[in-house]
Amino acid sequence: MAIASQPVPLVRFTWNLKELQPGSLEMPKPFVLRTADKDETDEAIAIVQASYNLDPSWSGCAMYTRDTVLPGVSKAMTREPSCLFVLHGNRVIGVSAYNCEPEDGGVHLVSGPCVITEYRSRGIGAALLFATLDTLRERGGTVATGQTRPNSPSAKYLYTKFGGKPVAAAVPVEANAA
């Protein structure tokens, strides 16, 4: 018998992309930003999964990650270009999968900026968020949405950048037990 999953509390953020100042934030050196290729889905999923699994603010959310976030990344990778990579040399250290036209109730930031643990606190996440928002703006978007755990570092420090505003808590998403 499957064990029922607890709802994952989320807070939704919105950005007015008309207010975004193009070119106002660049990726810190020596890191490089590039668009991911469709054939790099496995690498994108591995980075996103490691980022969520090793982030204490996402502790206890493995089923949500497996059943909601990772399938969203796979789906984003089928549309080109819908995923950004951050590289240190040839190593992918950050990923941001996005959806320019989310379904009703969906979000534009499918994975949110995901940076592997040893590269955090270097401005990479902020630069990756800015690049994702700027890409959505360039592709005709006027508003972007994303979600994260309430009181997480992302909610407190990252998603508030570039005019990000929390809106009413997102409807809890239940990850179905396998």
Image (spheres, helix red, strand yellow):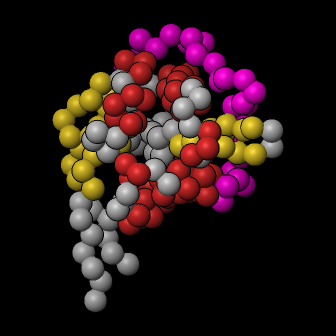
Q: Is residue 92 left or right of residue 153?
A: right
Taking the magenta stretch, the answer to whether it contains residue 86 is no
Instruction: Return the residue nearer the eye: 71 or 2.
Output: 2
Percent position of residue 105, x then y: 29, 45
Question: In the drawing, does residue 87 fall left or right of residue 10?
Answer: right
Q: Residue at x 34, y 34 (%)?
A: 155
**Above or below, 161 relative to 159:** above
Q: Which of these two is toward me, 36 or 94?
A: 94
> Which residue is depicted at the point 34% across and 40% down?
152
Q: Position of residue 42 (x, y in %)?
A: 66, 59
Q: Quadrant of residue 94?
A: top right
Q: Residue at x 39, y 28 (%)?
A: 157
Q: Quadrant of residue 31?
A: top right
The quarter of the picture where the N terminus appears is: bottom left
Residue in view at x 56 percent, y 37 percent: 120
Q: Along the horizontal axis of the image, is 105 left or right of 81?
A: left
Q: Residue furthest right?
A: 90
Asked whether residue 139 appears in the rendered view, the answer is no
Q: Position of residue 12 (x, y in %)?
A: 29, 37
Q: Residue furthest left?
A: 168
- Determine if the magenta segment contains residue 24: yes
The x, y position of residue 14, in whole percent, is 33, 28
The residue range painted magenta reads 15-43
Relative placement, left or right, of 64 versus 34 is left
Is residue 47 visible to us here?
Answer: yes
Q: Is residue 130 above or below residue 152?
A: above
Q: How many numbered marks does the figure carry? A: 0
